[in-house]
């Protein structure tokens, strides 16, 4: 079984990639994924659907064998259990929003960040 990118990044399996939880409640989670130029997030899947917005940089994704490039301002949706990988063609920052359905493998989902969290 493929790992989620939460498990890959949070457990520091990939250098030059970091993930931060910006907001989390009972139904949604928002994260910021920072990827340095040249870094590759290996093939992985997400246990839930999610939407993403590229805040900075340029990335290449391979989804089910189809190669796509995204630039600052692009958005996309990734459906659950779809295998994909990501390479940063420039330093990149991705905002991701998840419909949280239970635990996310390998990631402490109770962790929160931000000045407005109680």
Image (cartoon, rainbow, N blue to C red):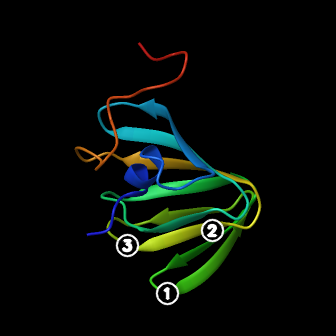
Residue 41: x and y, percent?
A: 53, 63
Q: CA distance from mark 1 to mark 2?
A: 14 Å
Task: Provide the secondary structure element on which disc 3 rests.
Answer: loop
Asked if residue 108 lies left or right of residue 17, the reply is left
Residue 93: x and y, percent?
A: 67, 49
Task: Provide the secondary structure element on which disc 2 rests.
Answer: strand
Of the image marks 1 and 2, the number of the one nearer the N terminus:
1
Foreground: 81 or 25? Answer: 81
User: Residue at left 40%, top 74%?
Assistant: 83
Of the image marks 3 and 2, the number of the one nearer the N terminus:
3
Disc 1 target residue: 65
User: Residue at left 38%, top 28%?
Assistant: 111
Foreground: 2 or 95? Answer: 2
Of the image marks 3 and 1, the number of the one nearer the N terminus:
1
Disc 3 target residue: 82
User: Residue at left 37%, top 72%?
Assistant: 82
Crowding near pointer 3: few (<14 within 10 Å), some, many (20+)? some
Q: CA distance from mark 3 to mark 1?
A: 11 Å
Asked if residue 76 lies left or right of residue 46, the reply is right
The quarter holding residue 28 reads top left
Residue 6: x and y, percent?
A: 41, 50
Disc 2 target residue: 87
In this rendering, the answer to whether 29 lies above or below 46 is: above
Position of the C terminus by quadrant: top left
């Amino acid at each position: 079984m493929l790992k989620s990118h939460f498990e890959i990044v949070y457990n520091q399996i990939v250098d030059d990639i970091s993930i931060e939880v910006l907001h989390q409640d009972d139904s949604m989670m928002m994260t910021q994924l920072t990827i340095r130029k040249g870094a590759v997030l290996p093939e992985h899947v997400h246990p839930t659907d999610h939407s993403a917005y590229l805040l900075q940089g340029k990335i290449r994704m391979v989804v089910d064998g189809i190669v796509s490039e995204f630039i600052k301002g692009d958005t996309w949706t990734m459906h659950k259990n779809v295998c994909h990988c990501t390479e940063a063609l420039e330093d990149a920052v991705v905002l991701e929003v998840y419909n949280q359905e239970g635990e996310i493998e390998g990631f402490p989902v109770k962790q929160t960040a931000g000045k407005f969290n109680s």
